[in-house]
Amino acid sequence: MGTTTTNRRDALKLLGQSVALSAIPALAIGAAKKASAGTINRDPKWDTLLAEYRRTHADFLLTLSVVNEAQARYFEALKEYPEPVSPKSDLAGLTLAQIARLAMKPYSRAAFDAYEADHKAWRAKRHALCERIVGAADKAHDEAANRHSYVCHAIKVYPVSSLPILLEKAELIAAEYGDHDGISSEFVADIRRIAQREA
């Protein structure tokens, strides 16, 4: 599974949180517009970027939900392929005295070689199963995550030309990345307060 997908998924933590986040773009922009009370002189390029943000954000969440469903099916199917048990695993639950007696016996290289072969075959089956059930969904989510990340970067570097639109930008970046990786809530509050005063 792709690195980008994994990082994004880790950031969102749970699918339930991801679904809740789907309302963030509309809420953030709505709050900004309310703060500026209709004084925004709209920038067509910025509005196009916002529309693309909403589209890629929704696509990211949709493909994430598909990946989660596919992973659930994969782990259920994997139950039909139990992992081979190492010959060393038969020591579990034994007393020290029993282990000491077993240690006196010649080590069965043939048994360990057979285990290695079985485990290699099991890993191949597991990989094929994952690719068959999750592969396409994971690839689609990787692509959606990359598209959304590209748009988020474009929003970060876009040169806004008015205070109300700056507030929209700050609200979106804060909502997307949070205090640690984006813009702090205190900074957004400063912009919101000035935008309200200047309205």
Image: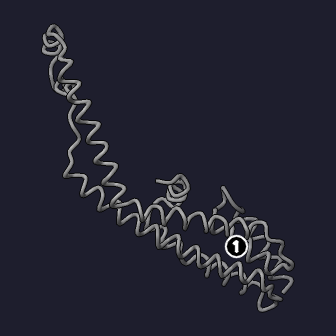
Give the camera-side residue of 13 and 139: 139
| Callout 1 amino acid | Glu
Please give the name of the residue rendered at 26% of the width and 30% of the height, measured from the top-left corner: 116
In terms of image quadrants, where is residue 93?
Answer: top left
| 160 to the left or right of 68 | right
Specify few, some or many for label 1: CA neighbours under 10 Å numbering under 14, 14-19, or 20 or more: many
User: Is 174 located above or below residue 98 in the figure?
Assistant: below
View extreme (top): residue: 104
Give the camera-side residue of 16 and 52: 52
Please give the name of the residue rendered at 21% of the width and 18% of the height, measured from the top-left corner: 109
Residue 46 lies, in percent from the top left, at 76, 80
User: Is 54 located above or below residue 173 in the figure?
Assistant: below
How many marks can you see? 1
> SS at mark 1?
helix
| 32 to the left or right of 113 | right
Residue 24 lies, in percent from the top left, at 59, 75
Split into 4 quadrants, where in the image is the C terminus?
A: bottom right
Please give the name of the residue rendered at 22% of the width and 24% of the height, measured from the top-left corner: 112
Residue 62 lies, in percent from the top left, at 47, 73
> Circle 1 is placed at which residue position?
171
- Colouring convention used in this rendered image of the protein: one colour
Give the camera-side residue of 77 and 29: 77
In terms of image quadrants, where is residue 129?
Answer: bottom left
Please give the name of the residue rendered at 31% of the width and 61% of the height, measured from the top-left corner: 72
In terms of image quadrants, where is residue 8?
Answer: bottom right
Residue 78 lies, in percent from the top left, at 25, 52
View extreme (bottom): residue: 38
| 129 to the left or right of 175 | left
User: Is 88 located above or below residue 12 in the figure?
Assistant: above
